[in-house]
Image: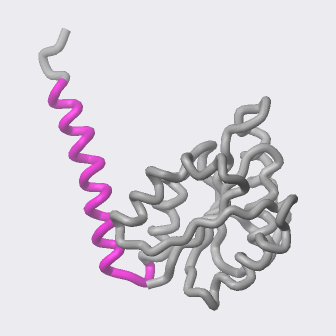
Amino acid sequence: MKKVLIILGSKSDVEAFDKARKLLTELGLEHELHIASAHRTPTKAIDLASTAVERGFGVIIAAAGMAAHLPGVVASHTLLPVIGVPLASGGLGGLDALLSITQMPEGIPVASVAIGGAVNACILAAEILAGASPELRKKLEAYRAKLRAKVEEDDAGLVGEA
C-alpha cells in the first residue's frame, strides 16, 4: 500500500500532528514526517516532493502557518495529491495560512482542510488511498462507525438530565 508523506514547516508544528499520526497508525498506514521550510530550506522541500512517488508515497500532507507557501511549493513539484493544513500562528490565527493554501493558481491544486485540521487531513489522505485498497476502506468504515457510536452514546447519556 502507498504511504503518506507529511511535511511540516517547522518543529513547532509537530505537536499539531500527534493525534493525526496515531490515527494513521491505527488505520495501518505507513507514514513519514519531515520538516522542510518553503523559505529556509526550499531545496529540501522540493526534493521531498519530487522524489515522493519513487519512495512509495501516494499522497502528501503539507502543513504550515502564516504565509503557508509550503503546500503550494510541494504541489508544484509532484503530481501526487497534496493536502494543505493551515496552522494557527501569527496575528491572524491561521486565516492567512488558510487563504494562502486555498488561493492556488489554476493547474496546481492543493486540497485544504480547516485551520488546525491535521486529523481531517489524515482521514482525507486515507480516503484517497482507500480507492485502491478494500482493506483500508473497511478500516475507514469501522472508524466512521465508531464516531457514530460515540455520538449515540453521548446522546443516550443526556436522556433525563435537567
Q: Is residue 11 above or below residue 30?
A: above
Q: Is residue 99 above or below residue 141?
A: above
Q: Quadrant of residue 9?
A: bottom right
Q: Residue furthest top?
A: 162
Q: Position of residue 72 (x, y in %)?
A: 78, 64
Position of the C terminus, as image quadrant, is top left
Main SS of the magenta part reads: helix
Q: Is residue 52 above or below residue 72?
A: below
Q: Residue furthest front?
A: 11
Camera-side residue of 6 and 144: 6
Q: Position of residue 19 (x, y in %)?
A: 44, 50
**Residue at position x 55%, y 47% from top?**
15
Q: Quadrant of residue 83?
A: bottom right
Q: How is the image coloured?
A: one colour
Number of on-image labels: 0
From which residue to which does the magenta span run?
131-157
Side of 77 where 151 appears, left or right: left
Task: Say if the magenta span includes residue 9.
Answer: no
Side of 135 where 18 appears, left or right: right
**Residue at position x 56%, y 80% from top?**
58
Q: Position of residue 32 (x, y in %)?
A: 55, 71
Q: Is residue 86 above or below residue 83?
A: above
**Residue at position x 54%, y 58% from top?**
121
Position of the N terminus, as image quadrant, is bottom left
Side of 154 where 32 appears, left or right: right
